[in-house]
Amino acid sequence: DALRQCSAVVPIEDTSGQIVPKPSALNYMTAPITGNNVGVLRAEIKQGIREVILCKDMEGKIGMRLKSVDNGVFVQLVQANTPAALVGLRFGDQLLQINGENCAGWSTDK
């Protein structure tokens, strides 16, 4: 019943002359998710510098691809369910140091 109340009845020209319900904009509105949902907390974008410690998986991989752009090293790809994804790395994150060594000016080859 609630869905029918949110649907606006707008006459649409039809050969049979019937009135057809057309969904209103209210049908497409959603409320923001609040609370202590782990998924929402992980999805939150936070500014600032943070230290991330990654351990390689059993195949010796961490699950991300890096790209050198304008003297900076950025995350180009993060695979799902990998160490990089589990610590919250995302596309576009900039790496400042790797193993304590500044990576400003590094090329993608290094």
Image (cartoon, rainbow, N blue to C red):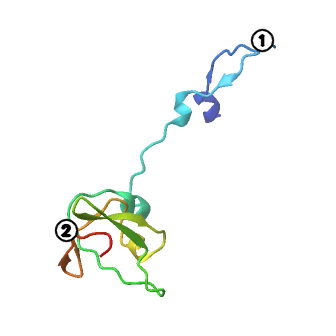
Q: Residue 92: horizontal and vertical position, in percent? A: 33, 59
Residue at image mark 2: 104
- For marks 1 and 2 on the same chain, the one whose residue lies earlier in the sequence: 1
Q: Is residue 8 left or right of residue 47?
A: right
The answer to whether 102 is drawn above or below residue 24 in the figure is below
The answer to whether 3 is drawn above or below residue 49 in the figure is above
Q: Is residue 102 left or right of residue 82?
A: left
Q: Residue 94: horizontal and vertical position, in percent? A: 27, 64
At x 20% / y 65%, what residue is drawn? 49
Q: Is residue 26 left or right of residue 95?
A: right
The answer to whether 104 is drawn above or below residue 44 in the figure is below
Q: Amino acid at mark 2?
A: Ala
At x 68% / y 16%, what residue is drawn? 12
Quadrant location of residue 21? top right
Crowding around mark 2 (Cα neighbors within 10 Å: few <14, some 14 to 19, many 20+) is: some
Real-space Cα distance between discs 1 and 2? 69 Å
Q: Residue 81: horizontal and vertical position, in percent? A: 48, 72
Q: Which mark is residue 17?
A: 1
Q: Residue 4: horizontal and vertical position, in percent? A: 64, 30
